[in-house]
Image (cartoon, helix red, strand yellow):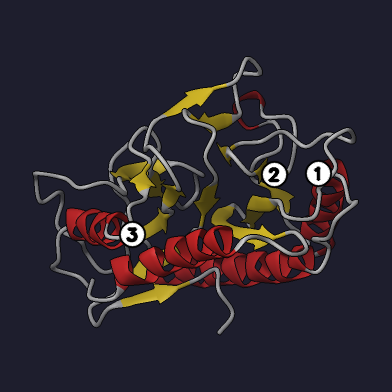
Amino acid sequence: MSVTIKASRELELMREAGRILALVHEDLAKMIKPGISTYEIDKEGERLIRSYGCIPSFLNYQGYPASICVSVNEEVVHGIPSPKRILKDGDIVSLDAGVIYNGYHSDAARTHAVGNIRPEAAKLIEVTKQSFFEGIKNIKAGCHLHEISNTIAAYAEKFGYGVVTELCGHGIGTHLHEDPSVPNNTQKSRGIRLQAGMTLAIEPMINMGTHKVCWLDDGWTVVTYDGSLSAHYENTVLITDEGCEILSLNM
């Protein structure tokens, strides 16, 4: 699939998809507390998405069985919700969600503290979030894609963290995953030149330990190779001539 440049009408639909997704994340954040199951989070997420007239992007996507990816502690991404998985005080949990609004996707992820967490876990969450903002700080049409990747990696690695290399961000629009791939780790090439109207899901996945990951037997859940904590922060971003616009964050 080639990189798509969105027309103004398409961008209005993607802005609305992003606005709705931001509201879903805001409501889900209020649910996060010790004693709740990851299944309950998923079901409330699906209810919220449908209440806005949207369709969950992830439900049945390539066989994924839920609407919200709920990943706890060493789980990097694509954790499958379960009534048996109960959040405990001191956990961290990543929620990755997507919505389809009138045929257009938005994709965003947040990592939350569950109750009282260790300072080093809180720092991982904050650095992961900030690495996203560092990555987009200076981008605009005419820059190259891998400026995003290299900036994210440089910021996260100075804290001694591992930047996941086997998973990356992506283009987004009428399909959840479009070209181009958006790596978070350092790249030797410059990558494609960014153009106004490109929409990207930029999503640093940062591990407290090694950058290496592995897949569980369910075929979906990705975990850190060394069992260390992992955090995830993502937004859908529009490239403009002047800079960029975050579509999935209500400022």
Quick one: SS at disc 3? Answer: loop
Amino acid at dot 2: Val
Is 111 left, or right, of 132 in this rendering? Answer: right
Q: Residue at x 50, y 71 (%)?
A: 247
Q: Confirm whether residue 60 shows in the render.
A: yes
User: Badge 1, how many Cα within 10 Å: few under 14, some, many 20+?
Assistant: many
* Residue 47 in picture, x, y percent from top left: 86, 54
Which tag, 3 or 2, sits closer to the chain's start? Answer: 2
The residue lying furthest to the top in this view is 217
Which tag, 1 or 3, sits closer to the chain's start? Answer: 1
User: Badge 2, how many Cα within 10 Å: few under 14, some, many 20+?
Assistant: many
Q: Are marks 1 and 2 in contact (CB under 8 Å)?
A: yes
Could you say which disc has been placed on residue 70 in the image? 2
Amino acid at dot 3: Phe
Disc 1 or disc 3, which is closer to the eye? 3
Which tag, 1 or 2, sits closer to the chain's start? Answer: 1
Q: Nearer the viewer, residue 91 or 32?
A: 91
Amino acid at dot 1: Thr
Res 80 → quadrant: top right
The residue pinned by badge 1 equals 38
Q: Residue at x 39, y 31 (%)?
A: 212
Quick one: SS at disc 1? Answer: helix
Q: Residue at x 55, y 74 (%)?
A: 249
Could you say which disc has been placed on residue 159 in the image? 3
* Residue 76 in picture, x, y percent from top left: 54, 40
The residue lying furthest to the left in this view is 189
